[in-house]
Image (cartoon, grey):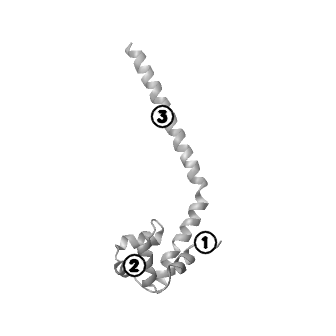
Amino acid sequence: MLAGIRWIFNLALLALTFYLIFLAIRALRVYLRSKEVRREETGLRQNLGEVLRVENRMTQEFAAQTVGVSRQAASKWESGASDPSTANLIALAKLYQTTVEEILHQIAPEQ
């Protein structure tokens, strides 16, 4: 009886292992197929720091303090890890003496 239960348990464990390997391979294939999309998105989002802060010769810390956020938040905006809120986007536009539309136009792809 105990041997039968162990056999069923081992079979279930083996099936679960194969299913997890299948899911991992499927996720890896999707990730590899999205390489061009990720590269394109990263290139667009990194322009925020180049277009604004670098052109105006401001440090990241100064810009973050002026807007009222942490330096890490400003860093995430520049790297594309997160997007500024509408209020922060307006504050950035005032800091860089431009409009929100100009900022969005400079970092958005041409359509």
Q: Is residue 3 left or right of residue 36?
A: left
Residue 13: percent from the left, percent from the top?
Answer: 45, 29
| Disc 1 residue type (three-letter) | Pro
SS label for mark 1: loop
Which of label 2 and label 1 is nearer to you? 1
Q: Is residue 38 left or right of residue 69?
A: right
| Disc 2 residue type (three-letter) | Gln
Q: How many marks?
A: 3
Residue 25: percent from the left, percent from the top?
Answer: 55, 44
Q: Which is nearer the eye, 21 or 106?
A: 106
| Disc 3 residue type (three-letter) | Thr
> Which residue is painted at 41% across and 75% down in the image?
88
The residue to which callout 2 is attached is 60
Residue 9: percent from the left, percent from the top?
Answer: 42, 24
Real-space CA distance between mark 2 and mark 3, rounded to the nearest whole angstrom: 47 Å
Which of label 2 and label 3 is nearer to you? 2
The residue to which callout 1 is attached is 109
Q: Earlier in the sequence, mark 3 or mark 1?
A: 3
The residue to which callout 3 is attached is 17
Q: Earlier in the sequence, mark 2 or mark 3?
A: 3
> Which residue is painted at 34% across and 73% down in the image?
70
Work out which quarter of the rendered image holds the N terminus and state it.
top left
Real-space CA distance between mark 3 and mark 1, rounded to the nearest whole angstrom: 43 Å
Q: Which is nearer the eye, 25 or 90?
A: 90
